[in-house]
Image (cartoon, rainbow, N blue to C red):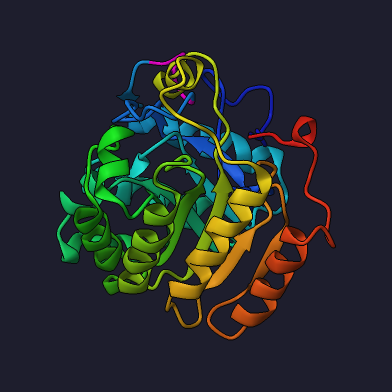
Amino acid sequence: MFIKGSENLRYEGSIYRPPSEAWSLIIQATIGCSHNKCSFCSMYKDKKFRIRKTEEILDDIKEARMYYRSIKRVFLADGDALIIKTPELLKILNFIKEWIPECERVGIYASPESIMIKTPEELKLLREAGLGIAYLGLESGSDQILAYMNKGADSEEIVKAGLRIKEAGILLSVTLISGLGGKKLWKEHAVESAKALSKMKPDYLGLLTLMVEPGTKLYDDVEKGQFQLLTPQQVALETLELLKNIDAEGCVFRSNHASNYLSLKGTLNQDREMLIKQLNEAIKGQIDFKDEYLRGL
């Protein structure tokens, strides 16, 4: 979580962004998440979803322009800002282009629903207006796990949405959560996720590791013994299975989020063997896993 802006920028509640947007100007275009029902997610629980008025968003962009001399990247928060109607989103993107001409890329969170309600032509217009990257949560390629986690879409729908983003010329960054299948479905999670990712072939793949937060349904299930968390070694074995089965040539792979027990980075498929070697060394105890108290979201 990170906020970049002056004290006059209007932020509501906690602000979340992808790790790669750490130094971006965060503009809150929506409040909360349009779905906000995932069993594992504790984000945006302090908010009721709504789309901000375009005039307010433009005012924040003006304020940021006055505050910062150089803004290379802008991220449109909160969750699923792509759900904003295309004409309004185009106004925002064109305003960024006018007021922040040095901006190299605008990023946005997207959901399968918000992607698919936009036509391919609309997405191309957004790309031409400056939308450079969309962040899409796959979480798991297993339909059984997606249904249990109340994701609101199955793997086929998520893959279809991801491909639509890529076809529009917008960079696709996909998030996967290690351990989301628990001890019961860890292998299914790895294999089915590899299948979905091999179909999408995202430009970027971010691998997070499950952290169970109080106030979520999954937390209650863990407390009741209905869901068993993986150990660090088991997470490594799951990641090993994922990498053995994935085919995503040119995909930038990162598993260096604060939640991860082991930091990994490379480019698929060329660095597969190097990544597998690091995982095997960790499983054998030759590389230390991060201590639990050092993990975070």
Where the C terminus falls, by quadrant? top right
Where the N terminus falls, by quadrant? top right
How far from the left and from the top, in percent, is residue 126? 31, 59
Nearer to me, 288 or 136:
288
Nearer to me, 158 or 194:
194
Q: Please tell me whether residue 64 belongs to the stretch shown in magenta.
A: no
* x 35%, y 30%: residue: 38
* x 19%, y 54%: residue: 157
The number of callouts visible is 0
**Quick check: 196 left or right of 108?**
left
How far from the left and from the top, in percent, is residue 129? 36, 62
**Quick check: 71 left or right of 203?**
right
Nearer to me, 17 or 255:
255
How far from the left and from the top, in percent, is residue 89? 31, 46
Query: In the rendered view, would you say 50 is above or below 282?
Result: above
Which residues are drawn in magenta?
A: 43-47
How far from the left and from the top, in percent, is residue 254? 62, 62
